Image (spheres, rainbow, N blue to C red):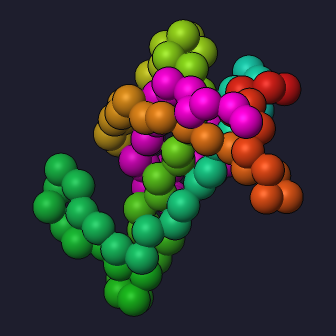
Amino acid sequence: MSEPADAVLLRIFVGEEDTYEGRPLFEAIVEMARQRKLAGATALRGPGGFGRSRYVRTEFNVDAGSKVPMVVEIVDHAEKIDAFLPLVEHMVESGLVTLESVRALRYIAGQRIDVFVN
C-alpha cells in the first residue's frame, strides 16, 4: 500500500469568458497541463462569485452572460508545479493563482496506488 505523497495544489481563478489564443482560457490551461504531463487537472464552473471589481457574477444573473467564475485545479509535485507557473503567468491576463501544500492519495478500483506514476 502506498503512502500519501507530498504535493502542491495549484488553483487558478479566471472568468469563463477569458480566452487564450482564441479558445477558453480554462480549456487552454487544462490542455497545457496535459501536454506538460502534470498528474491531472480539473476545471470547475462556479455558480457565482466576485473578484477585484467587487461585481457579483452568478449564472442566475441574465446580465452576467458567460462571465461566471472558473477554477482550474492541478495537483502534482512542487517541482512540476513550479515549472508550470511561468506558463500560467503568460496565459492569464487577469485572475488569481493560489498554491497549497497537500498530501495526495490516488485510488483506482478501490486500491490505493502511487500518486504520480504515469
Q: Quadrant of residue 22?
A: top right
Q: Position of residue 85 (x, y in %)?
A: 48, 19
Residue 90 x, y percent position in the rendering = 50, 21
Number of marks: 0
Reply yes or no: does residue 6 show up in magenta.
Answer: yes
The stretch of residues the image draws in magenta is 1-29
Check if residue 46 falls in the magenta segment: no
70 vs 82: above or below: below
**Which residue is drawn at the image coordinates 84% and 26% (left, top)?**
118
Residue at the (80%, 26%) spot, across then down:
117
Screen quadrant of the N terminus:
top right
**Would you say 118 lies left or right of 24 here?**
right
**In the depicted view, which residue is nearer to us: 35 or 17?**
35
Query: Image point 14% across, 61% down: which residue?
Result: 54
Q: Position of residue 27 (x, y in %)?
A: 67, 47
Q: Nearer the viewer, residue 3 or 59?
A: 3
Q: Is residue 25 above or below residue 78?
A: below
Is residue 95 found left or right of 112 in the rendered image? left
Instruction: Find residue 19 and report its horizontal and vertical position in percent.
Output: 57, 45
Q: Residue furthest front?
A: 1
Vertical position of residue 30 compared to residue 85: above or below:
below
